[in-house]
Image: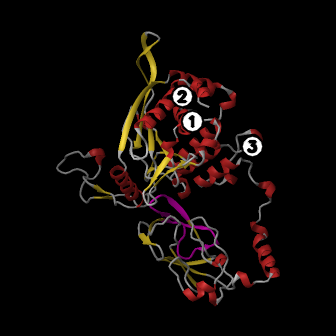
Amino acid sequence: MLKVFKLPDLGEGLTESEIVSWKIAVGDTVQLNQIIAEVETAKAVVELPSPYSGVVTELHEQPGTVVEVGNPIVSFDVPGEACSGDAPVGPSDSAEAAAEDEAPAQREPTLVGYGAEVETGKRPARRSRAQGAASTAAAATPAPAARVPATERPRSTPPVRKLARDLGVDLEQVGGSGPRGLITRDDVTAAHAAGSSAGEGAPSEGSPTQSAGTVAAGGTKTLGGQPREVRTPIKGMRKHTAQAMVDSAFTAPHVTEFLTVDVTPMMELLTRLRADRAYQDVKLTPLTIAAKAVCIALERQPTLNSRWDAAAGEIVQQNYVNLGIAAATPRGLMVPNIKDAQGLDFTSLADALRDLAITAKAGKSAPEDLRGGTFSITNIGVFGIDAGTPILNPGEAAILALGQVREQPWGHQGEVVLRQVTTLSLSFDHRVVDGEQGSRFLADVGTIMADPGMLITML
């Protein structure tokens, strides 16, 4: 029976997505929930699972094509389907009479990553309890060849398993370097790096188009020996990011304040912690201290963790911190966030920052990781930059730019000596945050980074 799968509503209020790559080809046999494509929304690249088990008969769209929600993207030949399941699947299907008679549990899920249900041609509400129990038991019992005993599951912790899923690393193929063969974060990232290196040299999907002609005209050398012009389509995340930055810059009145801080005690603390066996597997950087300092300072100045709700005519104070970290990725700027960062201890926050960076750089940040941020940090110091005027992430009231830490002459105990110094740049929405509140917040963050021992006076 022919089944047409239409581009589903990805649950983000978006109307279109770009086909980045197909993981299948015509003639392939696919299983239910097998990943069949990567699609790029305005927020992230996500994997699209198959809603059917069957044979691929047609790919309706090519990679690089922008498809509207509800349009066909792939057709399957599904064996043994009842006539009641012949209608194409997709959010635009609105046979109202059938929809009214259909139980909610039978409708097609709309979120990426859903586990599509096997269609039965019957309404679940009319099945007997015995039938329901039988079908549940059947669905829960895979074929013997596909069943893996629980004892064979690779040993790892839940955060490491999540990281492996995000990076697409099969833990069955990873050797564990931890105690008794435990698979660690380093094992996963090393396996991912090895896989990436093996795939280098392959052309990437949606790459820029080069202008026709020779690399150099009349013997004139071009930049990098490239064609004289390269045109990149403005779409996907780049288009969304550009529009969001324009909206933010011309909607929220930005104010930026700067504070230069002697962080020598902080750098000495990081050196001691790195030498401590308890922290040997924890990645500790100035960003780790800054992130913890931000969470503490927001508790003292919660106005900076608010948002301007124009539709409701309200300022919403959020008493939780979804801490966004600006990340440069192959597909442009992304700001994934750590949910409820205020509840994490120092080590857990460091681990979360590390996992976030690895996942973002691999382009695997999930849509839910990019939504709901309340405050952001951009670490421009990694590029050797001292200070800047960061633009607010849309929907947030403040953003902190962390400059590079470098030695420079500084007045210390009555003498001019070389000290480790950094500059903090805080931009905030002046509709929500007054100058006093912004200044006090920046001073709190600076105090903690200048002397982490002062933290005990703020708790």
Total count of labels: 3
Tell me where residue 24 sits by quadrant.
bottom right
Q: Which mark is residue 181?
A: 3
Q: Which residue is mark 1?
A: 296
x and y percent of residue 39 in the render?
49, 64
Disc with the residue nearer the chain's start (3 vs 2) = 3
Q: Residue 134, relative to residue 291: is it above or below? A: below
State if disc 1 and disc 2 touch (CB < 8 Å): yes
Query: Disc 1 marks which amino acid?
Result: Ile
Q: Which residues are magenta?
A: 21-47
Q: Let me know if residue 103 is in the magenta part.
A: no
Check if residue 33 falls in the magenta segment: yes
- Compared to 320, does 266 lie above or below? above
Question: Residue lying farthest right?
Answer: 130
Q: Amino acid at mark 3?
A: Gly
Q: Residues within 10 Å of mark 1 (few under 14, many from 20)?
A: many
Give the labeled residue for mark 2: 448
Colour style of the rendered protein structure: secondary structure
Residue 41 horizontal/vertical position (percent)? 46, 62
Q: Quadrant of residue 212?
A: bottom left
Q: Amino acid at mark 2?
A: Ile
Residue lying at the far top of the rendered structure = 414
Residue visible at 36% across and 57% down in the picture:
243
Q: CA distance from mark 2 to mark 1?
A: 9 Å
Instruction: State the residue in front, 37 or 324.
Output: 324
Residue at image point 73% right, 43% down: 182
107 to 45, vertically: above or below: below
**For the residue labelled by badge 3, is the local secondary structure a helix, a strand or a loop?**
helix
| Residue placed most toward the observer, 262 or 302 | 302
Q: Nearer the viewer, mark 3 or mark 1?
A: 1
